Amino acid sequence: MQRNHQLSLRILFFLSMWMGGQLMAQQTISGTVIDSQSGETLIGVNVYVQGSTDRATITDLNGNYSIEASQGEVLIFSYTGMTTQTITLGESTLLDINMSSNLVLDEVVITTGYGNQLRSSYTGSAAKAPMEEIALAPRTNF
């Protein structure tokens, strides 16, 4: 009985030490995400810890974010039209990111009279209509 009690206490001690180390390793990483060309803050940038499904956030109206992560983990910053950035965390808890535009968009959305479709799934013909030509088109009142 005494032996089982001592074993249980040792296991509990080691588990608490391990859990304490895990919790202490987590820190709040925060910063601002900026468009490197215009200098404006970016709203709605996806920020997440690589390999994690429960640690993610987006930037607020001022381009600020805050996320829990540990030193050595990888943060990924992604935004439509911008090059995705991958940052390995060091000791600093303040991390400002400058994102540059990605000139190649991965998908094109086609707007039809019936809704929006991706270019890859659209089976009809499509053409671009410049706004200058639309402005010159005759108008009728009904």
Image (cartoon, rainbow, N blue to C red):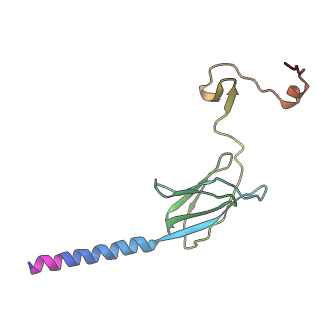
Kindly identify the residue that appears in the image at 65 percent across and 27 percent down. 115
90 relative position to 35: left or right: left
The quadrant in which the N terminus is found is bottom left
The relative height of residue 76 versus residue 16 in the rendered view (above or below) is above
Measuring from the top left, give residue 122's x and y in whole percent.
Answer: 62, 24
7 relative position to 133: left or right: left
Q: Residue 116 or 123: which is nearer the viewer?
A: 116
75 relative position to 43: left or right: left
Q: Quadrant of residue 86?
A: bottom right
The relative height of residue 117 versus residue 12 in the rendered view (above or below) is above
The quadrant in which the C terminus is found is top right
Measuring from the top left, give residue 96's x and y in whole percent.
Answer: 66, 65
Measuring from the top left, give residue 11's x and y in whole percent.
Answer: 23, 74
- Residue at far left of view: 1
Q: Main secondary structure of the magenta part?
A: helix
Kindly identify the residue that appears in the image at 65 percent across and 58 percent down. 60
Q: Quadrant of residue 111?
A: top right
| Magenta stretch contains residue 5 | yes
Q: Quadrant of residue 22?
A: bottom left
Kindly identify the residue that appears in the image at 68 percent across and 49 percent down. 82
Kindly identify the residue that appears in the image at 89 percent across and 21 percent down. 139
| Magenta stretch contains residue 9 | no
127 relative position to 117: left or right: right
Measuring from the top left, give residue 34's x and y in whole percent.
Answer: 71, 59
The relative height of residue 14 versus residue 50 in the rendered view (above or below) is below
The span picked out in magenta is: 2-7
Q: How many marks?
A: 0
